[in-house]
Amino acid sequence: MRHEPQHSPRDLRCGSCLTASYGELPPAIGIHLLDFDLFQDPAHQDQALWCFEMRDAARPAVTVGQELQLNLIELRKADRLQQTDGALRAWITLFEHWQEEDTMAQIVDPPLRAALDKLKTLSADAEARRLAFVRERALRDERSLLKDARDEGREEGLEEGREKGLEEGLEKGRAEALRLTAVNLIHGTDLSDAAIAAITGLGVDDLAALRRAV
């Protein structure tokens, strides 16, 4: 990277962004909310908000500026210490006490109320969350099996013909992925065979056979 008068430390994070204007690059600031105490040393119990900046290992006093930051908020500790105020304190209270009706009744800020309503909506339907988790796990398994099938198809293709091997491998992996998805839905949900058939594309007879097998 050549030196230019308009360069700032934030350019370090985007040295490969050849189409971006250096003068328009925003700071790179990460904010992480932790629902546990990361720094548990007794000497660190009076601080819950941490800001880390890039600095030289040999000369810690030399930094690249405030454009690159990692901010950590230990929510439980911050709630105990009550050292913040304003909007930040309200958000901490929301994350730590959103199930307490009396405490939440004191929140009037529209963004906070919207976040609270969203949390209540998600928590009210535990079964929907469980089904979403099962479905997501099944989709991950399907993607993994399809990837294995592609890899297997490529290897077979090198020996027996690339196109034929890839096609057979994909078909085999797709069938196995659909079967595993159906098994997960049978075990993890109360869905009927007709509903699972609509999701996976398998026949009702096939699903009945799977239920007997598992």
Image (cartoon, rainbow, N blue to C red):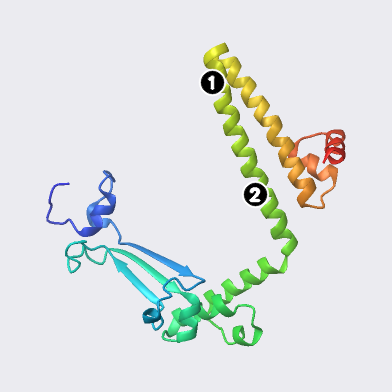
Describe the element under mark 1 as helix, strand or loop: helix
**Which residue type carries mark 1?**
Glu
Q: CA distance from mark 2 to mark 1?
A: 29 Å
Q: Is residue 110 above or below residue 200?
A: below
**Which residue type carries mark 2?**
Glu
Of all residues shown, which one is farthest toward the front?
42
- Eye-nearest disc, 2 or 1: 1
Please tell me how crowded label 2 is: few (under 14), some (14-19), or many (20+) other residues with Cα within 10 Å.
Answer: few
Q: Is residue 204 in view from this perspective?
A: yes
Q: Along the polypeptide, which appears first: circle 2 or circle 1? A: 2
Q: Nearer the viewer, residue 89 or 209?
A: 209
Q: Is residue 149 left or right of residue 84?
A: right
Callouts 2 and 1 close, C-beta under 8 Å: no
* Residue 8, x across and y down, in percent: 19, 59
The part of the image, by quadrant, that contains residue 156 is top right
Q: Is residue 42 above or below residue 156?
A: below
* Residue 162, x across and y down, in percent: 54, 15
Q: Is residue 199 in view from this perspective?
A: no
Of all residues shown, which one is farthest toward the top?
160
Residue drawn at 57 percent across, 12 percent down: 160
* Residue 157, x across and y down, in percent: 55, 16
Residue drawn at 81 percent across, 45 percent down: 195
Q: Which residue is mark 1?
A: 155
* Residue 74, x across and y down, in percent: 45, 74
Q: Which residue is mark 2?
A: 136
Q: Is residue 142 above or below residue 49?
A: above
The part of the image, by quadrant, that contains residue 120 is bottom right
Describe the element under mark 2 as helix, strand or loop: helix
